[in-house]
Image (cartoon, rainbow, N blue to C red):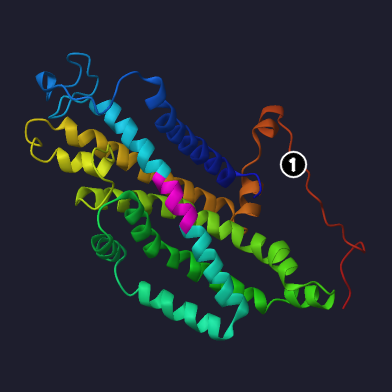
Amino acid sequence: MRSGRQKTTFIIALVACVTFVLMLLIAPLVIPGDPNATELAKALKAPGTDGFLLGSDQGGRDVLLRTLAGGRESVLLGFGVLLVVVVIGTFAGLLGGYAGGAADYLVNKVVTAFQAFPSFVLAVAIAGILGQGTINMIIAIAAVYWTQFARLTRSIAISFKRSDCLKAARMCGARTPSIILKYLVPEIAGPIAIMGALSMSDIILTMAGLSFIGLGPERPTNEWGTMIAEAQPTFQYALWCMLVPMVALFIAVVLFNFLGDSLRDALDARNAPQASKTNPSFISKLLGRKGRERKVRPLTKGKAKL
């Protein structure tokens, strides 16, 4: 990753995502109050009344506290699902792409079978068979999204097997575990990081969708999908109960998509030289110095003779 506009955009996206995640993780611990505490006398209070900054729901619970607590659950569960998906998908892709033969044939057929169905429909089917619960939801989502990482890792491993780098390493006496750790793993680290950032938004959306239809964590829970489902009866006269978790879900999806896109642009080797050439650093602009350019001097003076 070279310096330039792409790297600056990635740093901005990373800082925004880290700030948003830390706010969701720390805010429920700092702000006093129980997000699940009900008080029917204060039900459906408008934002800014009776101490409710963003209003209360039909049970008298603070919508802001519930949204922050639900974001904490969604983010932690999302990172847990992403970790499981990356480990399973990367291992299966490396096994099929690098080993080849029967292992590659089996991995390819299994991945094709899982990707033959729409991702959310398959997640709903698996969660419906397993039943409601956090563990079952994690299994259902992991069974859907591991195929993306497996296919990506498999394609990189197949192209790596045909490269001169592998031939040179084998000629030098390097063993298979050393080749995988020193050469193949760094090769797939960048694409895996990009797909992980982009898949995080899909995982959060899928969790919210499963919770919305009642296949998520068991209640009482503050997951954003559950909050949106509970706010349906009061949607016409208490819009804030549904709007606040929807806005939080929208911000999370946009931030992680922005992080993945900026990371992809920053790691793109075709953009790096152009970015570093056309976008000088802030220090260079401030001091008014031009970057050093190597000039090619002709070997002979005058015109070349044919």
Name the residue: 56% across, 47% down. Answer: 6
Q: Position of residue 79 (x, y in %)?
A: 45, 47
Q: Nearer the viewer, residue 131 or 73?
A: 131
Give how far across and how far down residue 85 sits, in percent: 46, 59
Magenta-tinted stretch: 77-84
Residue 79 or residue 16, whichever sits in front:
79
> Would you name the residue on which mark 1 appears?
291
| Magenta segment, prevailing SS (helix, strand or loop) | helix
**Location of residue 148 (image quadrant):** bottom left
Q: Is residue 228 magenta?
A: no
Q: Position of residue 249 (x, y in %)?
A: 31, 41
The tally of labels here is 1
The quarter of the rendered structure image containing the C terminus is bottom right
Dot 1 amino acid type: Gly
- Residue appearing at x 55%, y 39% in the figure: 11
Displayed quadrant of residue 251: top left
Task: Give the residue at the far right of this rendering.
Answer: 300
Which residue occupies 7% across, 35% down? 236
Instruction: Please indicate, yes or no, whether residue 268 appears anywhere in the rendered image.
Output: no
Q: Residue 117 at what x, y percent from top left?
A: 30, 71
In the image, residue 49 sits, relative to residue 103, either above or below, namely above
In the image, is residue 83 part of the stretch drawn in magenta?
Answer: yes
